[in-house]
Amino acid sequence: MIKLSPIFTLSAALLLAAAAANTQTPAAAPAGNAAPTGNATHGKELFVKYSCYACHGFSGQNGNGARLVPMKFPQVGFIAYVRNPPRANQMPSYSPKVLADADLADIYAYIKTLPDSAPPAATVPILSQILSQNQ
Amino acid sequence: MAKIKKLKVDRRGFLKGAAASAAVGAVGSVVSGSDAVAQEQVAQRNATAQPNPATLAADTGVRPVVSSRIVEKPGSDFMVDVLKTLDLEYVAANPGSTFEGLHESLINYGDNKMPELLTCCHEESAVAMAHGYAKIEGKPMMALIHGDIGLQHASMAIYNAYADRVPIYMVVGNHADGAERSSGVQSLHSAQDLGELVRDYVKWDDQPWSLGHFAESAVRAYNIARTPPMGPTLITMAAELQLHPNTQPGLRIPRLSRTSPPQGDSTAVAEAARMLVNAERPMIMTERTARTPDGMKLMIELAETLQAPVSSNERMDFPNRHPLAGAGFANYDPDVVISLEVNDVSGTARAARARNAKTISISSIDLSHKANIQEFGKYSEVDLDIGADAEATLPALIEQINKLITPDRKRAMQGRGAKIAAAHKEARKKAIELASVGWDASPVSLNRLCAELWPQIKDLDWSLVSWQGFISGWPGRLWNFDKHYQYIGGQGAGGMGYGAPAAVGAALANKKHGRFSVSIQTDGDLNYAPGVLWTAAHHRIPLLTIMHNNRGYHQEVMFIEQAASIRNRGADRAHIGTKLWDPDINYAKMAQAYGMEGFGPITDPKDLAPTFRKAIELVRKGEPAMIDVVTQPR
């Protein structure tokens, strides 16, 4: 019944810092060996089944986790990251026992199909208006 | 849980008679054939159902005009007289037999005014409504609670209010006299020491043994609840005191004396001022400083005097678009941090020690510790700890700071303030730009939801009566919060089930001021006790509820996912026990079932704006309305 909750703040700066941390696209990893093309349909199933959406959103770009769309990692880098995220508490790791490389390749293929739905704020009338109030 | 009223002897007799009648009917249809024995039994029963001549004469003969059982001046009427002196606008209650005497007095003797009774479908809803109300109005609402079972229902909401330092005026009924109460339900709903059930998380409680004692304790409880650090107080009220005639001569109601909030020691305050004025990068952190509208004004004055950044948690302590809102500019490592009414300063103090910085705390929480519940957090090694109410101490602190500021320090502060303001503006711009991410996504992104809502409410006198924690703080990033009533913060103790009733209570407080209340309501929270929607509809409480329907207890989804990962088991079963799908819950239909207009479910973000428009129009006319929006998880 009682839930632990992360601390969120009304204060602009802390919110802004959190926003930046939560939505930044991961830096590109060096390209490795060419990997097999994944099955995006199966990848979609796995994306939901393994709760990828929980942190990255069903859109792959909304939530507490890093923004996956547009995907900046090559497939090999993506798999390496998921296997062993470099920083503690950044995201759960997924070992080969849990998800095979082929499964991760399928998830990767699915993420690549997700539309990049992030128009420049200045082109969205509502956001443009809010931006203008910031002057 | 329904409460069973006591069965009196005459009612038992009635039930016995009803059962016999039913048997007669059933048997009668059988014996319409040729069962003579059964027919004889029916005849006998019919005969016993008729009064004999002696009974008939006794029941219809000459009797006193007024029943001798009538109580002309019950004790609970006097209790209402007491309560009416305490500026209580409302009393929220789920009905219960341990307070039936006071209930009747409130609605008839008290004319259901000051306080007016609010019908609640759960005791937790009643107390949480009072919680939300107090956060807007700054004073307690009364919650009337049933003995034992009602108090246990209410306990979670009481704990939230205690941890959130919110005043709630609670009265709980009790069949205190063992000689007078009956077996069964009355005994089940009685206790030797009822307050003990929640004593770990109420500020004060008492069980008066006479009406005079009730008057004194009732007034004392009100004052204690409102004195910082504020909190819920509880009066256990014997059913016998309510129901018996008031025969006590010379009863009087004590005048309410208000205790002034504790102000910081003058030497310590002067030292705090010296540390802040001499600091190169001071930082102000606040959680629950602004108890009153003046609190926010004082916060602004402090920040502007020092030209220091303000990080505001939990409450509406500081305007989010103020140039000094935030954590300062890049690499702004504070050398002095002042924490105002921050519950747990340990992390701030630890980080400060690591960079040889100093920490000051002004908090009333140090004046009200209990032992069992660990809500006080980790031990904080601060350098200057002032046990006092922060809002009450700010005038003296600001005065001392002004005395110490030299022209040189003032120039340095102004330079610092300009850099902080520039950083604030840039950070805010980045935050707004991020709001376009997932703009057309379905399910709907929370940034889009909040962005679409803002232009439709920004010119109203609005109030956000829900917590931002589960919606990634998007209102704080996009909207302009500059009034004390525009945000009520979180649960206090992280107890779910608070959100929906707190929103209704806050909206009720906003109603008399003509404010527009909006709640972005999480689905998991609403499902604890959705009956509060009926309370909102029944009492015509204008509130726009927008469902953040992510179909699950999402925080727990992430926790289970993390736990499974650590154990190398995968997250493919993390939905078990955490998701609210299969079947999906239709909140528009839920709202309609409870008597308010329901819209949705909305899955296409293009439908947000027109639906908001329709619902806002309804709410502005004085009705509650709900929009079900199927959302991204966060």
Image (spheres, rainbow, N blue to C red):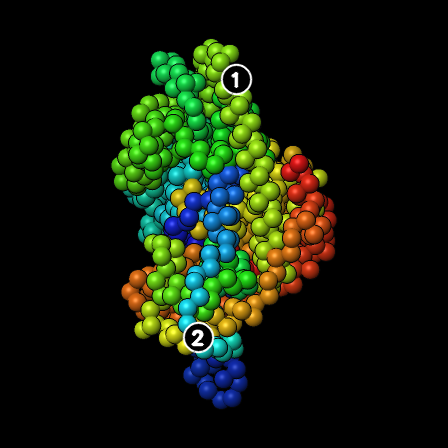
Check the image and name the residue furthest to the left: B371
x and y percentages locating residue B590 in the rendered image? 58, 61
The amino acid at mark 2 is: Ala
Q: Is residue B150 above or below residue B459?
A: below
Mark carried by residue A104: none
In the rendered view, does B564 fall on the left or right side of B93?
left
Which of the pair A97/A49 is nearer the observer? A97
In the image, what residue occupies the spot 51% across and 63% down?
A71
In the rendered view, does B106 fall on the left or right side of B236?
right
Mark carried by residue B411: 1
The image quadrant that residue B378 belongs to is: top left
Q: Is residue B15 above or below residue B271?
A: below
In the image, what residue occupies the spot 46% across and 20% down?
B394
In the image, what residue occupies the spot 39% across and 74% down?
A101
Q: Residues within 10 Å of mark 2 (few under 14, many from 20)?
A: few
Quarter of the figure that contains the N terminus of chain B = bottom left
x and y percentages locating residue B3 in the rendered image? 43, 54
Element at label 1: helix
Which of the pair B387/B126 is nearer the observer? B387
x and y percentages locating residue B14 in the rendered image? 46, 61
Mark carried by residue A35: 2
